[in-house]
Image: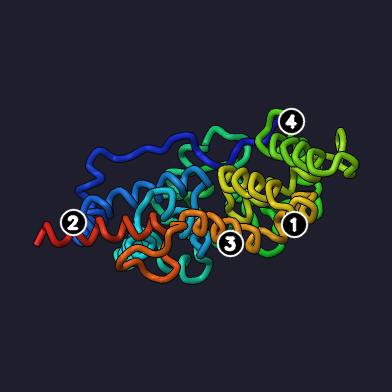
Amino acid sequence: MPRTNPGLDYFPVDVDMESDDKIELIEARHGIVGFGVVMRLLMRIYRNSYYYQWGEKEQLLFSKRINVDINTVNAIIKDSLEWGFFDKTLFEKYEILTSKGVQTRYLEATSRRQRVELVKEYLLIDQNTLNDYKNTLIVDIKSEDVDITTQSKVKESKVKESISSENFSEDSLEMRMVNHMITKILESYPGAKVPEGSKKQKWASTFDRIMRIDGKTAEDIRAVMTWIYQDDFWCTNIRSPEKLREKWDTVYLQMVGQSRKKTASPYGPKPGQKPGESDVDYLDRIRREKWKQDDQ
């Protein structure tokens, strides 16, 4: 059976969501920008699954994509945590954005899937609720051990064996990533050794872990791979998903840093432009400062 993408294609939004005290507090302090940022965060969370990793690289990329200053985004995040829209404890311990409501809606939306994996340390849902969903598997964040959430226990070795032997179909997201990487590797080095046939399953399994365990989206992976195979150094050093996973943080930060440098003006800084501030960030800051002056 082809593996189901852990993310959702859509998610339900209550028509009276704006009446929620947590949302009203965010809007009261940050205006419609606050509401918009929260909605974009929910989109990002559900696209990934039921949580979203919120480290430095995610902050930079998210801010760039929605064209909102990173300090404004993080101020909204801070208030969302303080007012309980996202769970503060899990954020401080694991740097993830999630909530009990998000997880409940995710379980309901995936109730017809054959299997839904949940990280034990990230769960905010009680065991009685979990027992209502017979398709859930609990994954330990450290050892990746799995237990069925019903009362019966499955031995660790058998569970690991069932996961490793799972076949990813050629049209699965994981296998498409494998084939894309193989194509790019052979373009840069035609004589490179790449897996064929059933041996590609191991690579597919690693891409699955990058998304499921590391919390990277398919969009992030595509962006990173595109950048890697345009870079003279990294295209010869990353020739497997395992190496991509190992070097992810280094590559990602270099990619984001290079992208910001490209936005700098070749004619030098503009009046009032801060050191290291790109033209895009400069213009966005000036525009927001002008809005504030007009409102006063």
Q: Is residue 136 visible?
A: no
For label 4, count other residues whose C-alpha is less than 10 Å away and answer few (under 14), some (14-19) or many (20+): some
For label 3, the residue is 253
Secondary element type, mark 2: helix
Name the amino acid, label 2.
Trp
Name the residue at 66% across, 51% down: 210
Local packing at callout 3 (Cα closer than 10 Å; few below 14, some 14-19, many 20+) is some
Sequence-wise, the earlier of marks 1 and 3 is 1
* Left or right position of 117 against 71: right
Image: 164 above or below 54? above
Q: Quadrant of the N terminus?
A: top right
In the rendered image, residue 27, in percent from the top left (x then y), is placed at 22, 55
Judging by the rendered image, the residue that carries numbered circle 2 is 291
Instruction: Give the left or right position of residue 144, taking residue 106 as reference.
Output: right
Label 1, secondary structure: give it.
Answer: loop
| Residue 67 circle label | none
Amino acid tagged 3: Leu
Q: CA distance from mark 4 to mark 1?
A: 32 Å
Whole-number angstrom distance, CA of label 2 to CA of label 3: 32 Å
The residue where tag 4 is placed is 169
Task: Identify the image quadrant of residue 77.
Answer: bottom left
Viewer-proximal residue among 156 and 233: 233
Measuring from the top left, give residue 66's x and y in whole percent.
39, 49
Q: Which label sits in the foreground, 1 or 3?
A: 1
Query: Mark 1 highlights which residue?
Result: 233
Residue beneath the point at 62% across and 43% down: 222
**Residue nearest the viewer, comparing 161 with 210:** 210
Q: Is residue 265 visible?
A: yes
Q: Which of the 4 image quadrants contains residue 14?
A: top left
The amino acid sitting under disc 1 is: Phe
